[in-house]
Amino acid sequence: MKNLEVPKIGLRTIKTSLSVFLCLVLLPNEPFFACLTCLFCIQDTLENSYNMAKNRCIGTIYGAIIGLIIMTIFKWMTINIDSVLLRKLIIYISIAIGIIIVIHSNITFLKMPGAINVSCIAFLAITTTHAFGDPYYYAFNRVFETLCGIIISLIINKTIKPPKLKQIPR
């Protein structure tokens, strides 16, 4: 029987775990998106961490704004429609159009293709999970949790034996 060598737990894994722990402690009621953000923002270099944090921040805010606009338009368009089926069809079409707007404007307006996925996730989280509830409260919390996760992960990544910044070849 061979000796199985268990790989060591890396520092990045420990920093990610610590960041998630702090999110759970500091945001005990709704830590999910903050914890998720930590998973993405602890990167192999500080530069990559900052870039990911920038994409998460701008992408989340942008997706939330577009989601709120679509939800406001949806509520205005369907205020006098009693048919649940017709209301659902209108919101599904609105969401599909919203995804096109989010993706296209991330590329052309924001010039941040790296934020497309995050923008789409925030947009879909707001429009699909709170289509008939209060999307404004949810959008605020979604952005707030993401910003908390960004701040916590960047502080942890920078203060606990920070990874090296990428060196630009000369």
Image: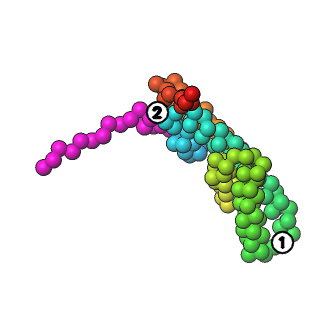
Say which amino acid is labelled 1: Ile
Residue stretch rendered in magenta on the structure: 1-25
Badge 2: residue crowd in 10 Å (few <14, some 14–19, many ≥20) = many
Residue 28 point in image, percent of width and height: 56, 39
41 or 137, nearer to the observer: 41
Looking at marks 2 and 1 on the same chain, the residue that comes earlier in the sequence is marked by: 2
Q: CA distance from mark 2 to mark 1?
A: 51 Å
Q: Where 126 sits versus 40, above or below?
A: below
How many labels sit on residues? 2
**Residue drawn at the location 76% of the way across and 64% of the way down:** 97
Q: Does the magenta run of residues contain 17?
A: yes
Q: Which circle, 2 or 1, is nearer the viewer?
A: 2
Q: Is residue 24 visible?
A: no
Residue 15 disc label:
2
Could you say which is closer to the camera, residue 74 or residue 117? 117
Quadrant the C terminus occupies: top right
Residue 10, magenta (yes or no): yes
Kindly tell me whether residue 83 is visible in this rendering. yes
Instruction: Read off the residue under disc 1.
Output: 81
Residue at the location (41% across, 32% down)? 11
Left or right, 129 with respect to 109, comes to: left
